[in-house]
Image (cartoon, helix red, strand yellow):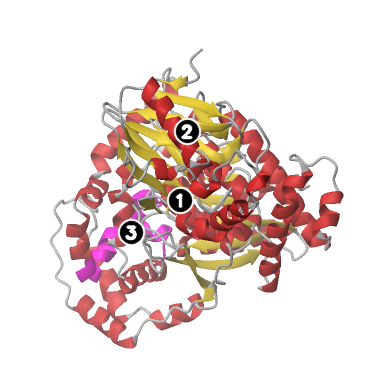
Amino acid sequence: MDPWITVAPGVHQRRYDPLDVSIVVVEGAARLLVVDSRAEPAEAEALLGDIRERFDKPVRWLVNTHAHYDHTFGNQAFGPGSETDAAIYGHANIERHFAEHEAPRLAAWRADPAREPDRHWSDVRLTPPTHPIDRPVTLDLGGRVVLLRPQPPAHTDTDLVLLVPDARVWIVGDLVEESGPPMYGSGSFPFGWPDVLDELVAEMQPGDVVVPGHGRVVGPEFVARQSADLHEVAGRFVAAHELGLSASDALASHDDWPVPVDYLVGAIDRAYAQLDHLAGKGATASTTEASRGPVAEPAPFTIRVPEAELRELRDRLRRTRFTTASSGTHWGSGVDPAYLAGLVAEWADGFDWRGVELRLNRLDHRIADVDGTRVHFVRATAGPAGGTVVPLLLMHGWPSSFLEMLPLVTALGWEGEVRGIRFELVIPSLPGFLYSELPDEPLTREAMADLLHELMVGHLGHRRYGVFGGDIGGTVAAWIAAKHPRQVMGLYMIHPPFPAVFDEPLSEPERHMLALEQEFDERDGGYSAIMSTRPDTIAAALADSPAGLLAWIIDKLRDWSDAHGELERRFDRETLLTLATLYWTTGSIGTSFRQYVDYPANRPRPRITVPAGFTLSAEEVIRDMPRSVAERSCADVRAWHPATRGGHFMAHEEPELLAGHLSAFFAEVLGVD
């Protein structure tokens, strides 16, 4: 019987004793990639012999799934100076982990050779990766690619996952163990580990193959069950810490731990140390924050535009050159020049920015450094002090800002009083908007979701929270809900999420809606095409002309709101000019386009399993959307309110209507009478 198990075409697993270590070989067109190197040079040489006997191709790459000895102590047989001379890839933290954990372990074993007389620890030369990585890397094997993805701290702070996309095979090392319980080894992160597994499960598809670090191959369901066990352990650690139990008493307080209790001795010590650190800095004992170490408290922030900048703005406005209307129809070809001229004149000489600035600064503005990206947000509470607490993340779209959500804060306060709910509101400026920076990576919806989830959990300490958004903010909310179902109590949107692909059969209402969407894109998609394909060109014009910036924004406020052609039915002039001033003084109109530019980098979103609710906006296409569209993406639709009134900016346009629906939804989800 062939000891190599073909888990997918060109992907082979072999399990080695002792420890039932999993070795994987991935075939390229002419060369091989090997995953992990076993526990000592002699074992690695035996592995290479087995590979040569089974495969008629040379080894070109070795990838370490993490730093532990049973996966890396054979590296020297593959690396520089060896006959194989393979490129060794692994997490950038492996060399440090070697120094802190594996080198002391190796020294102790060498000092006591009688402990394992069959081992040859004196032969081991610690060989870290020749290609350490701290961000995703794609290896081209010829005819197929393999994705290498370093993970946040979990089983170790050196975990790396491989994905073979064409075969849908995930190679996850000891993040998952099948032939034994999860091993909380040296440097494990008991709080971060289940979160990492949750994110992996969210990306997996039915039928995917998962190769664990020890044992037979499994599927996504097994990974989800192991994650649930690890969450149970983490939750018990937090509860015991909050009760003031010692580590030993905490372990003795349960006789049904999901893993053997002796595995947890070191784990609970590490968990308590992390929780003690957080308690010392006055933070909520969030398990995810604990897994990632200390973070800076979000700093208070004050909006203050220099007087010289305001003078320059007014001067530019007074010198605006206006165009002649292209069409005889009122607003027939975009912004009406006469209306724009009146609004520009008021902006230059009738708008009291300092008064607006004073009122805005009464809000609790904060800045958080989230993984190196500056994120601005407003914090507010709405509802009675003794009510059921619902942390709620409210996210705007384009061309909007945190201003859109402010009327909703007041309305949620009224609804909260009625229902006994206290909303703890977090209202960010999305990355690239106003006072929030762009991250270094492409600005996908998923990247924005990752930043804002980390803000909520890692910086603000919310263990569970709800998400709401419209437009881009809605798609970000959907990503957060899809990736973090254990932390997200519910998702609410005004624009239901589209599936990645509309699989047949389509219902007649779905066909009708898609036809309307195509007509809309052909008629009104010019703005998106320009911002996607020539963003720097249009940004150069708008960054230099406040009147042009104002026109670009109000054109969409009028078209997409439920204003029936009368812009000021929904937006008074102070609101229009406040929004334009914020975009102008932050210089962020160009960066707000980035999510259009980077749209092709988005990947299909996983299915959403958390409770979901919808109040459809009354704008084109959305008002004709059947419930079945949402059900293609969402497994648990709890609320569906067809369009009545309120458009693209519903939180501003119809705050009372939306607040009533939102509060009823979260009351139902939480079982609040």
In 3D space, how far apart are the residues under numbered discs 2 and 1 (Cα atoms)?
29 Å
- Image position of 131 with respect to 581: above or below: above
Circle nearer the viewer, 2 or 3: 2
Asked if residue 519 lies left or right of residue 465, the reply is: left
Image quadrant where residue 507 sits:
top left
Badge number at residue 408? none
Badge number at residue 592? 3
Three-letter residue code for mark 2: Trp
* Mark 1 or 3, nearer chain start: 1
- Image position of 379 with respect to 476: above or below: below
* Mark 2 or 3, nearer chain start: 2
Residue 243: give x, y in percent of width and height. 83, 60
Residue at x 43%, y 25% (from the top left corner): 50
Asked if residue 49 lies left or right of residue 666, the reply is: left
Which segment did they paint magenta?
543-572
Asked if the residues shown at circle 2 and circle 1 are in contact, with their CB atoms under 8 angstroms apart, the answer is no
Q: What residue is pinned by disc 1? A: 125
Q: What residue is pinned by disc 2? A: 170
Q: Secondary structure beneath disc 1?
A: loop
Residue 549: give x, y in percent of width and height. 26, 65
